[in-house]
Image (spheres, rainbow, N blue to C red):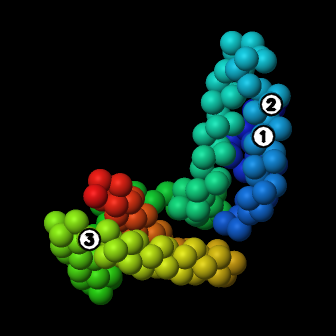
Amino acid sequence: MYEVTNPFEMFDIAIGYTIDKNELKSKFLALQKEYHPDNISSQDVILSSNINSSYEILSDDFKRAVLVLELQSGIKLDMTYQTNLPTEFLIEQLELHEELEFATQAHDSAKLEVLELRVIHEINKIKHSLIDLFLQNDCAKICMIIPIFSYYEKLLENINDKILNI
């Protein structure tokens, strides 16, 4: 197999935020079958690992957004320190975290599930916004929305952990 420089090349898919996930999965399964560690030499095990990593990135909307931004514009976001987020968003995050703590302390799974649905709704709005922003090549807004996407994804993970532990 040829040397690949990015996950899109691995699966021969055009670089873009919007992808056909069924096509991705089909290509992943075909490559996995061909390059599964049980069927290849030890030197190709790295390739099998790269196939898995590439699939993980492309199948995850957040990771794919970060990659597409970097590949299309050369902008590599540092997600470690995000100090320029809108004040309204930061206040909303504080309120959501308070709701999460109150619901967790009360062992109120119904409130946690409602909170989960609210966060999923926000994530879906962000995904739809990213589709438009990538089409418009609006890198400034994409750079603002990706960290917000990250916050909501982490909050959703936290909510799901709390639901499982109630």
Q: Secondary structure at mark 3?
A: loop
User: How far apart, in angstroms, are the residues tagged by discs 2 and 1?
Assistant: 6 Å
Q: Which mark is residue 98?
A: none
The percent coordinates of residue 6 (x first, y second) are 67, 45
Q: Amino acid at mark 1?
A: Leu
Q: Quadrant of the C terminus?
A: bottom left
Q: Residues within 10 Å of mark 1 (few under 14, many from 20)?
A: some
Residue position for label 1: 29
44 sits to left or right of 56: right
Label located before the other in sequence (2 or 3): 2
Q: Amino acid at mark 3?
A: Asp
Residue 26 visible to the viewer: yes
Q: Residue at coordinates 65% horizontally, 76% vertically from top-left?
A: 131
Residue position for label 2: 33
Which of the 4 quarters of the picture holds residue 90?
Answer: bottom left
Q: Residue at coordinates 44% horizontally, 76% vertically from top-left?
A: 117
Q: Amino acid at mark 2?
A: Lys
Which of the 4 quarters of the picture holds residue 13?
Answer: bottom right
Q: Secondary structure at mark 2?
A: helix
Label located before the other in sequence (1 or 3): 1
Residue 144 visible to the viewer: no
The percent coordinates of residue 92 (x first, y second) are 29, 82
Residue position for label 3: 108
Q: Quadrant of the N terminus?
A: top right
User: How far apart, in angstroms, are the residues tagged by discs 1 and 3?
Assistant: 41 Å
